[in-house]
């Protein structure tokens, strides 16, 4: 039974802040946003969670293993060190997008993203237990991105190819399965998924290739925390590389490595 705990992170009243008393230098905003993401990655990652930068002013974290006290500490620590504060909504569901719907509804119910009175909301449902099949993390990677794009095209045209693959995958996984896919740099996309079969992952890869011509492969891990599931997914992706297969699940041996001797 999947139990994905998702936290919607929203900077309070950030839009008005960026232009008060007059528009702030763009690179200063970029510095603030990327430092805040780095701090969140360290805080959440150090507790076994994952955080994705999404739009930077709004971020999504997978927080199985983090309780209400952890979330309060995160708000306090950011509030002490940054000129902005964070509101946090938390939801749990076996379908990731449903968990995020719940998490977001808690934040939205407390007021607008641009409400100067709404600060440091913390509301939500936390997953009390811990089971080895709480989370399914899929680590997608563009097949031979270096040979096909990075070593051949200019950086912007490479970027277009990778982003097209990402856009097609994120939409397909959201619409077909309620899964949430996030670009994490290079040619990598990490998806938080419900319990899906290898056939369903293969269909997603086929759909992306059909729509935008980008070839993907994916390793999938299942565990109690995002780090454990994601780490297992990376090992499964290595199995794809060694076996030449498009989909591998961590810890399975149904596609043995061919004997090359
Ligand atoms: N975020 C993240 N980025 C990675 C990871 N592994 C590789 N990358 C990025 O992806 C880029 C491409 O590396 P690979 O995916 O290994 O290269 P490739 O040419 O696609 O080769 P194959 O994946 O073996 O087909 C690297 O330059 C990194 O930026 C990872 O585990 N996480």
Image (cartoon, rainbow, N blue to C red):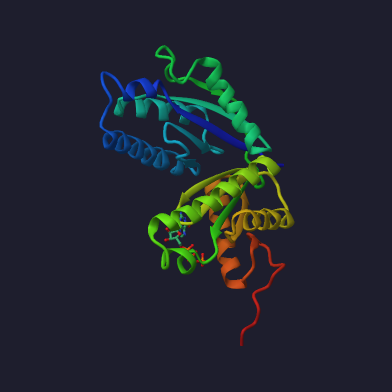
Q: Is residue 240 above or below residue 112?
A: below
Q: Is residue 164 above or below residue 238?
A: above
Quadrant for the C terminus, please. bottom right
Q: Position of residue 200 (x, y in %)?
A: 72, 53
Q: Position of residue 75 (x, y in %)?
A: 41, 26
Q: Nearer the viewer, residue 121 or 178?
A: 178
Q: Is residue 60 above or below residue 237?
A: above
Q: Is residue 257 left or right of residue 58?
A: right
Task: Count up the numbered dots.
Answer: 0
Q: Residue at x 69, y 69 (%)?
A: 255
Q: Position of residue 50 (x, y in %)?
A: 50, 43
Q: Is residue 158 left or right of residue 230?
A: left
Query: In this rendering, does residue 127 appear at all?
Result: no
Query: In this rendering, does residue 185 appear at all?
Result: yes
Q: Nearer the viewer, residue 42 or 211?
A: 211
Q: Residue at x 62, y 26 (%)?
A: 102
Quadrant for the N terminus, please. top right
The outermost residue toward the top is 117
Q: Nearer the viewer, residue 110 or 212?
A: 212
Specify the quadrant of the image occupied by residue 208. bottom right
Q: Position of residue 152 (x, y in %)?
A: 42, 67
Specify the quadrant of the image occupied by residue 157. bottom left
Q: Residue at x 41, y 68 (%)?
A: 151
């Amino acid at each position: 039974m999947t139990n994905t705990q998702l936290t919607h992170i929203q900077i309070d009243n950030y839009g008005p802040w960026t232009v008060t008393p007059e528009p702030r230098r763009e690179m200063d905003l970029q510095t603030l946003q990327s430092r805040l993401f780095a701090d969140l990655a360290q805080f959440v990652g150090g507790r076994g969670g994952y955080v994705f930068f999404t739009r930077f002013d709004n971020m999504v974290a997978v927080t199985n293993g983090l309780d209400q006290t952890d979330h309060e500490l995160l708000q306090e620590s950011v509030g002490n060190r940054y000129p902005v504060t964070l509101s946090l909504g938390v939801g749990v569901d076996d379908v990731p997008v449903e968990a995020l719907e719940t998490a977001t509804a808690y934040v939205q119910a407390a007021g607008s993203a641009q409400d100067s009175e709404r600060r440091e909301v913390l509301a939500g449902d936390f997953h009390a237990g811990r089971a080895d099949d709480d989370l399914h993390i899929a680590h997608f990677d563009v097949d031979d991105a270096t040979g096909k794009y990075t070593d051949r095209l200019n950086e912007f045209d490479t970027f277009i190819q990778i982003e097209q693959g990402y856009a097609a995958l994120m939409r397909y996984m959201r619409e077909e399965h309620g899964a949430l896919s996030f670009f994490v740099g290079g040619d990598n996309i990490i998806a938080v998924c419900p319990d899906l079969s290898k056939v369903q992952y293969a269909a997603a890869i086929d759909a992306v290739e059909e729509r935008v011509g980008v070839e993907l492969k994916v390793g999938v891990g299942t565990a109690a925390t995002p780090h454990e599931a994601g780490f297992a997914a990376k090992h499964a992706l290595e199995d794809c590389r060694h076996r030449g297969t498009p989909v591998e699940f961590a810890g399975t041996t149904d596609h043995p490595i061919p004997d090359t001797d």
